[in-house]
């Protein structure tokens, strides 16, 4: 036997299918906007991350640097909190790399008696530490070794990327927050309409001696289910939008699973909370 | 049973609705509450249901006092009251039997017993054959009978009726009132607000309490009442 509250909630869907549909669609579409925004923000973030992965600090070594010194320096630098990996590159490797990547060296370099390429330490940074200050700190550390001749990193573009990232991050929180707020308001309104349509039922329930908790339960359950279905709808809509964009315009990535769960959870929570608020008003009014 | 003692009721915007009203309704009585619109009839019924509370004075209903009742006890009180309104207040999207069953379901009654009980109640009000009808398919008198069946669902100790015949033609009104008489004859207390003076005059055997501008101006039992309270 199904408990009363659950039966009532399902009955409500059957009795007022249009209103229920309206609530689900309202929730679905307002969260769809949030989902689309999430998809955009996520892909921009991924694009920036991909550029940032290339952030690297390279220290060029003098020819008289001893292997033991290089080994010690490698280990010390590896111990820095910002550093993900240190790769020592020998003179021979450097020349091989150059030959491989640069056409013009292929003929010239074999003629050279001595190898003109310096050995180096290539330092890559951890994802959180690809900021101008962290990079500068690592560079300074490298430079402190007497056998490090020169330190290079793309300072100019690093600064710019970092700025863009900051701006986008700020904008994303504000716009995303605004979208989420609008979604919450739309959902609250839709649920309020649904509860308002059943205010008579609420007043009759009170009349015949139903407790507040008893009256509330089916509405809360209804709000919960409506919110959940709306959340699923928004996830489906977002996925459809993603497939269309991905196949027709440009390659993008699908948002992480927990973001999808977040949107569905938000719909469920909004549905539940707005129901609770709306029923509260009516319980007070009677 | 029901006892109002020196009750004042004032609404913030519309001023005093009841002034110094004392009224004692005993078990098994049928009492007409009469008076013009706005005389305070509905206010008394609302106070008895504890949908409202007196500004001063006390309302006692079957062991519940307006002074001490907790909000969460009120549903318990309401289950002991059967209420009928002028506008029936049936749920239009449920059949007659579902409307009656609703009152039982919301009090957490066992489902198994409900159908049987609903059948009996609809039989009592003479509507067994309309159990599957929706309110819109019923006449005014029939709707009010469904409302009465619903009011009786939880075995109340009193039936409160607020202008139960106000929306009915004379024939239907008489039918509904005959039902009230039957219910009263079986021992149930009935408190009925009405401005149908013909109906009141046609039944001199019942007690009449008349209100005017929030005060009791006539009580057919007042002499009796006075003697009894002095004797007590």
Image: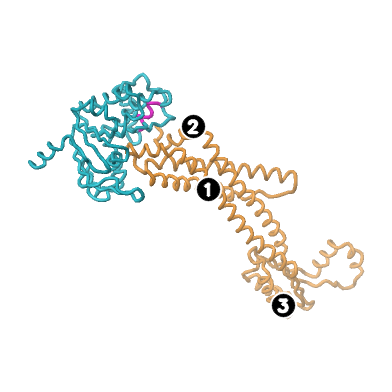
Chain colours: A orange, B cyan
Which is in the foreground here, disc 3 or disc 1? Answer: 1
**Is there one chain holding both mark 3 and mark 2?**
yes
Label 1 crowd bin: few (<14), some (14–19), many (20+), radius 10 Å: some
From mark 3 to mark 1, how far is it between C-alphas?
A: 50 Å
Q: Which of A86 and A255 is in front in this view?
A: A255
Secondary structure predominantly adopted by residues drawn in magenta: helix
From mark 2 to mark 1, how far is it between C-alphas?
A: 24 Å
Instruction: Find numbered disc 3 in the image and state the secondary structure of the residue it sits on.
Output: helix
Label 2 crowd bin: few (<14), some (14–19), many (20+), radius 10 Å: few
Q: Which of B44 and A85 is in front in this view?
A: B44
Q: Nearer the viewer, residue B6 or B95?
A: B6
Chain for numbered disc 3: A
Residue span colored magenta: B95-102
The verdict on residue A225 being magenta is: no
Label 3 crowd bin: few (<14), some (14–19), many (20+), radius 10 Å: some
Q: Mark 2 points at which residue?
A: A14
Which comes before the other along the chain, label 2 or label 1? 2
**Is there one chain holding both mark 2 and mark 1?**
yes
> Is A153 left or right of B69, judged from the image as shown?
right
Q: Name the residue under label 1.
A: A265
């Amino acid at each position: 036997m199904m408990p009363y509250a659950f039966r009532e909630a399902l009955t409500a869907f059957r009795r007022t299918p249009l209103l229920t549909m309206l609530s689900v669609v309202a929730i679905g579409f307002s969260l769809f906007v949030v989902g689309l925004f999430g998809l955009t923000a996520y892909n921009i973030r991924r694009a920036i991350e991909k550029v940032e992965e290339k952030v690297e600090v390279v220290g060029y070594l003098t020819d008289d640097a001893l292997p033991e010194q290089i080994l010690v320096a490698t280990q010390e630098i590896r111990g820095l909190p910002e550093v993900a990996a240190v790769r020592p590159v020998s003179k021979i490797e450097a020349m091989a790399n150059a030959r491989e990547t640069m056409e013009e060296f292929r003929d010239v370099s074999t003629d050279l008696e001595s190898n003109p390429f310096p050995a180096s330490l290539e330092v890559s940074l951890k994802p959180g530490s690809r900021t101008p200050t962290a990079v500068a700190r690592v560079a300074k550390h490298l430079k402190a070794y007497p056998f490090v001749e020169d330190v290079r990193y793309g300072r100019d573009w690093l600064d710019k990327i970092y700025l863009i990232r900051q701006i986008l991050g700020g904008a994303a929180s504000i716009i995303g927050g605004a979208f989420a707020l609008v979604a919450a308001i739309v959902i609250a309104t839709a649920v309020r309409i649904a509860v308002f349509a059943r205010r008579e039922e609420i007043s009759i329930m009170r009349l015949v001696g139903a407790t507040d908790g008893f009256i509330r339960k089916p509405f809360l359950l209804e709000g919960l289910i409506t919110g959940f279905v709306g959340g699923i709808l928004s996830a489906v809509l977002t996925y459809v939008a993603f497939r269309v964009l991905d196949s027709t315009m440009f390659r993008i990535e699908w948002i992480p699973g927990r973001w999808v769960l977040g949107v569905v959870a938000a719909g469920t929570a909004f549905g539940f909370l707005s129901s609770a608020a709306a029923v509260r008003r009516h319980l007070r009014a009677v | 049973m029901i006892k109002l003692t020196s009750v004042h009721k004032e609404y913030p915007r519309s001023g005093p609705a009841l002034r110094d009203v004392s009224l004692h309704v005993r078990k098994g009585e049928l009492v007409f509450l009469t008076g013009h619109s706005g005389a305070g009839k509905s206010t008394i019924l609302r106070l008895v249901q504890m949908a409202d509370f007196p500004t001063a004075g006390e309302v006692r209903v079957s062991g519940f006092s307006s002074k001490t009742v907790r909000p969460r006890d009120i549903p318990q009180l309401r289950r002991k009251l059967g209420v009928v309104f002028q506008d029936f207040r049936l749920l239009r999207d449920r059949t007659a039997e579902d409307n009656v069953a609703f009152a039982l379901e919301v009090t957490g009654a066992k489902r198994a017993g409900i159908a049987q009980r609903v059948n009996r109640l609809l039989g009592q009000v003479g509507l067994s054959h309309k159990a599957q009808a929706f309110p819109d398919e019923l006449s005014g008198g029939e709707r009010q009978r469904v409302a009465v069946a619903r009011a009786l669902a939880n075995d109340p100790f009193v039936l409160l009726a607020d202008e139960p015949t106000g929306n009915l033609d004379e024939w239907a009104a008489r039918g509904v009132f005959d039902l009230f008489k039957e219910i009263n004859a079986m021992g149930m207390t009935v408190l009925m607000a009405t401005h149908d003076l013909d109906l009141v005059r046609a039944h001199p055997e019942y007690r009449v309490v008349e209100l005017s501008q929030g005060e009791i101006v006539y009580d057919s039992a007042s002499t009796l009442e006075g003697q009894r309270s002095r004797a007590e």
